[in-house]
Image (cartoon, grey):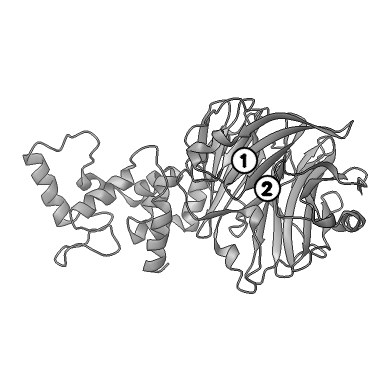
Amino acid sequence: MTSSQCKQFSYFTSKFRSSGVSPICNIAAANNNNGGGYGDGGGAATTTRSSWMCPSAAAERERKRRKKNGAAGEVGTMDPLLWGRLPEDLVDKLVQYLPVPALLRARAVCRRLRDFVFSDKFQEARACVPAWSYLSNKETPYLLVFVTIEGHRLCSAYDAVADVWRRMPPMPGLPSRAKDCVAGDGGLLCFRDVDEQGQATLFVYNPLMQHHRELPPMQVGNSMILHEWILTHMVMDRFTGAYKIMVLTKKHGLRKGAHMEVYDSHKQTWTVDIGLSALERRYNLSFSPQVGACCDNFFYFVAREGICGTNIMGLVVYDIFEGCWREKLLYRCEPRCPGSKIEVQVVECKGTVYMVVREDDCAGTKGVSFCRLNPSREQKIEDAVLFESFFSKWGSKFPSYRCVSVRSELGLLLYDKSFQVLVDDLSQELMLPTCPFEGLENCVSSTLITCSECPQLQMLKRNLISEVHYQPNPAACV
């Protein structure tokens, strides 16, 4: 990693918050103040660099000065001489237990730490940290938030029972190139990798058992240079343990031509479903990158109707068990005010599917409504509306968000660098504890990945953020 890359990475990592001051950070502070040895450069020209085993002369002089001034016993300050004499294996042991934000900052302490964090030895040691054992209650669903920074995957899990965010270690057994988490169900997670040629590869992984499977290439939409990836969804059959992965793609530059491919873990093959094309032609549908929802064996996702230039949106419904489509666009909605535009998200919460409709005009966000779906009558019932006054604290326009289910309630995970969540029957604002990724900048949702800059694939090099619900299941087979 070049010095410019290190500076760029330091810009991102400096935005992370840490729950406390780590010993490694104290090492950096002490040695930076002494002009000595743990930095990659810097310090006076006459200063001698210290090794891991032997403290520098400057550190020795500082220790004597502090002892003389009676400052050696100050609370929160570690004697650099003690840290300098620690054996390497003990320092490595301390590093492997650092939380993610402190670990990222520790990489900037010296070249020795930076190389260690990227080594196989560290990955093996970090895998032994029992953080994933926290997620052992099968009855508790967790909200996992993944962030990929400069090609490195980070994960944090929200534990609704303890009301805390847990910083998760690297996932042992999962290939390092599988960084983008795109779906999950039944204790399994689905990751995506896109190489420099735009070829996509999917991996299925069980974090508890540390097993993974690399899926075979899709038949049609495997190239993200030729196709736009619209959505990915995973659903598991709780009785048989088999799972299906549905991927919706369409060719770049074409309004129509979307198709869905389905992977069946029992057959271990991909099949192409062509039934969507008739519905697409009938209503002149268009699709944007999104996240779908599944309930009672039906899969829902959003489409925009293009007949006569209307701004009408609705849901396309797919019967997973039968492998067929509903023959019309359901739960249609349109802007309340002339000149406004709407954005629709769909989410499942406690066995119910919701449409979350956001309306914006040139002045900003006008409101966000939450509509509960009634499949038996093909109706939607508006449960709550967040009006314009609710958004005043964020300015005229509401920040980017993803609708999620957390604490068994519907909520909005805000992507405005605060990672706040609005929950509790939508009648009041209830914030989750501070997310470890709060303050993160320059990230884009993984659902918005596009390769319009092909063949350079510039979008894929940006920092990604994604979220998925996870329920531990050691019996789930990949």
Q: Badge 2 is on which residue? A: 340
Label of residue 366 in the image:
1
Disc 2: CA contacts within 10 A as few (<14), some (14-19) or many (>=20) = some
Judged from the image, the secondary structure of the residue bearing numbered disc 1 is strand
Tell me if residue 445 can be seen: yes
| Disc 2/disc 1 C-alpha distance (Å) | 9 Å
Whether pointer 2 and pointer 1 mark residues with C-beta atoms closer than 8 Å, the reply is yes
Which residue is pictured at 54% across the width and 50% down the height?
Answer: 147
Which residue is pictured at 75% across the width and 66% down the height?
Answer: 227
Q: Quadrant of residue 39?
A: bottom left
Q: Position of residue 318 (x, y in %)?
A: 86, 45
Look at label 1 and name its amino acid. Lys
446 vs 120, nearest the viewer: 446
Most extreme residue toward the left is 68
Q: Is residue 296 above or below residue 94?
A: above
Name the side, left or right, on which 313 lies relative to 155. right
Most extreme residue toward the bottom is 455
Disc 1: CA contacts within 10 A as few (<14), some (14-19) or many (>=20) = many
Name the side, left or right, on which 429 lies relative to 434. right
